[in-house]
Image (spheres, grey):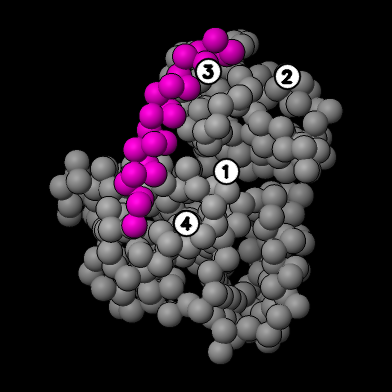
């Protein structure tokens, strides 16, 4: 019986979720996906005969939620399907998923890896808690009810080192799926991130790249009333660049964008400070749906795909609605 786990490839929460599912269920196939690839990958998966499917840490937007539920429903006719996530899901989609036989493990109050750990703790070694704590820390959700019980179990500096190094390894390897699979495999064997072969070396190179990029980013920031934005012209993950923009601008929110020619759209990353009073994930979902794109996320962190011709419009609307 083929046991498949499809998980988010761009951050620690998604990679750890895949590792925990692999460890708990001896998953035979790991599929690592970004958001633009989610539906096409699921479509291909629906054509295969599988026994179990876990989909982890891949949030939905208004543009793709119905298609997502429809495909998972198709797969669930012949396979055991579980969707584990911590992004907003509309009540209608929750209902549709459950009606089609999909098992839903969902709360916005814990990151996905903590939910995976909590759900399948009986199937996992004690070390799995450390991996879940890394997911919570890097997703800025270490103060959530279950996560705040996990994180203090470990020396904070050691946990931060391992979690940050993992984040840098992942960011440095977005075009190298084989290395991402190596991370998943190593962690699934209940090893530490420092045990990933050549992992810390890769993280160190990425750290140097981050340091060298700061000055470049600084000179390209545009500040509006509520929003600071900049193109992501450096070879770093947008989620990392946007934190620099947010910190240096002093604005309630910041965004960075990078053109992906193959899809004719900008991939956008948005972050909010404590001064940002709107739920960015919900707001971005609404705006992108109107503009023919897609997006969503958390209250202070969101991602989007915006059609190439409508980026300026997106920026203007976003700035006007952030307070």
Residue neighbourhood size for the residue with mark 4, other residues' Cα within 10 Å, grouped as few (<14), some (14–19), many (≥20): some
Inter-mark Cα distance, 3 to 2: 21 Å
Could you say whether the residue bearing mark 2 is in a helix, strand or loop?
A: helix
**Mark 4 or 2, nearer chain start:** 4
Instruction: Answer with left or right where residue 93 lies relative to residue 19.
Output: right
Instruction: Residue at 50%, 48% (x, y): give it.
Output: 173
Q: Where is 2 relative to 89, above or below? A: below
**Mark 1 or 4, nearer chain start:** 4
Residue that badge 3 annotates: 217
The quarter of the picture where residue 122 lies is: bottom left
- Of the two numbered discs 3 and 1 in the rendering, the one whose residue sits closer to the viewer: 3
Is residue 106 at all visible to an observer of this figure? no
Q: Main secondary structure of the magenta part?
A: helix
Asked if the stretch drawn in magenta spans residue 199, the answer is: yes
Residue 269's x, y, as percent?
59, 34
Residue 281's x, y, as percent?
59, 39
**Mark 4 or 3, nearer chain start:** 4
Could you say whether the residue bearing mark 4 is in a helix, strand or loop?
A: helix
Residue that badge 1 annotates: 297
The quarter of the picture where residue 204 lies is: top left
Inter-mark Cα distance, 1 to 4: 26 Å
| Quarter of the image that includes the N terminus | bottom right
The quarter of the picture where residue 78 lies is: bottom right
Which stretch is magenta?
A: 197-221
Inter-mark Cα distance, 4 to 3: 28 Å
- Of the two numbered discs 4 and 3 in the rendering, the one whose residue sits closer to the viewer: 4
Q: Where is 158 relative to 19, above or below? A: above
Residue that badge 2 annotates: 316
Asked if the stretch drawn in magenta spans residue 45, the answer is: no
Instruction: Residue at 43%, 80% (x, y): give it.
Output: 26
Residue neighbourhood size for the residue with mark 3, other residues' Cα within 10 Å, grouped as few (<14), some (14–19), many (≥20): some
Residue that badge 4 annotates: 179
């Amino acid at each position: 019986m083929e046991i498949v786990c499809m998980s988010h490839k761009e951050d620690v929460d998604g990679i750890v979720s895949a590792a925990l599912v692999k460890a708990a269920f001896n998953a035979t196939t790991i599929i690592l996906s970004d958001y633009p690839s989610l539906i096409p990958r699921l479509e291909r998966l629906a054509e295969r005969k599988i026994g179990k499917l876990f989909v982890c840490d891949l949030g939905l937007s208004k543009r793709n939620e119905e298609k997502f539920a429809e495909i998972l429903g198709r797969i669930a006719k012949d396979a055991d399907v579980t969707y584990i996530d911590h992004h907003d899901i509309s009540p209608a989609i929750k209902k549709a998923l459950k009606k089609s036989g999909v098992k839903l493990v969902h709360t916005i109050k814990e990151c996905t890896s903590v939910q995976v750990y909590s759900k399948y703790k009986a199937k996992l070694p004690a070390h799995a808690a450390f991996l879940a704590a890394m997911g919570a820390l890097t997703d800025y959700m270490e103060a959530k009810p279950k996560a705040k019980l996990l994180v203090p179990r470990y020396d904070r500096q050691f946990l931060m080192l391992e979690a940050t190094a993992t984040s840098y390894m992942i960011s440095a390897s977005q075009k190298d799926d084989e290395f991402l699979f190596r991370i998943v495999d190593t962690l699934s064997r209940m090893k530490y991130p420092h045990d990933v072969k050549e992992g810390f070396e890769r993280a160190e190179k990425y750290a140097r790249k981050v340091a060298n990029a700061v000055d470049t980013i600084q000179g390209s920031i545009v500040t509006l009333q509520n929003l600071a934005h900049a193109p992501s012209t450096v070879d770093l993950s947008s989620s990392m660049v946007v934190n620099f923009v947010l910190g240096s601008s002093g604005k309630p929110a910041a965004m960075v964008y990078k053109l992906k020619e193959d899809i004719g759209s900008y991939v956008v990353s948005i972050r909010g400070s404590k001064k940002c009073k709107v739920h960015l994930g919900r707001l971005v979902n609404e705006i992108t749906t109107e503009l023919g794109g897609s997006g969503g996320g958390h209250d202070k962190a969101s991602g989007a795909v915006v059609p190439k011709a409508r980026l300026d419009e997106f920026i203007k609307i976003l700035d006007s609605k952030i307070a």
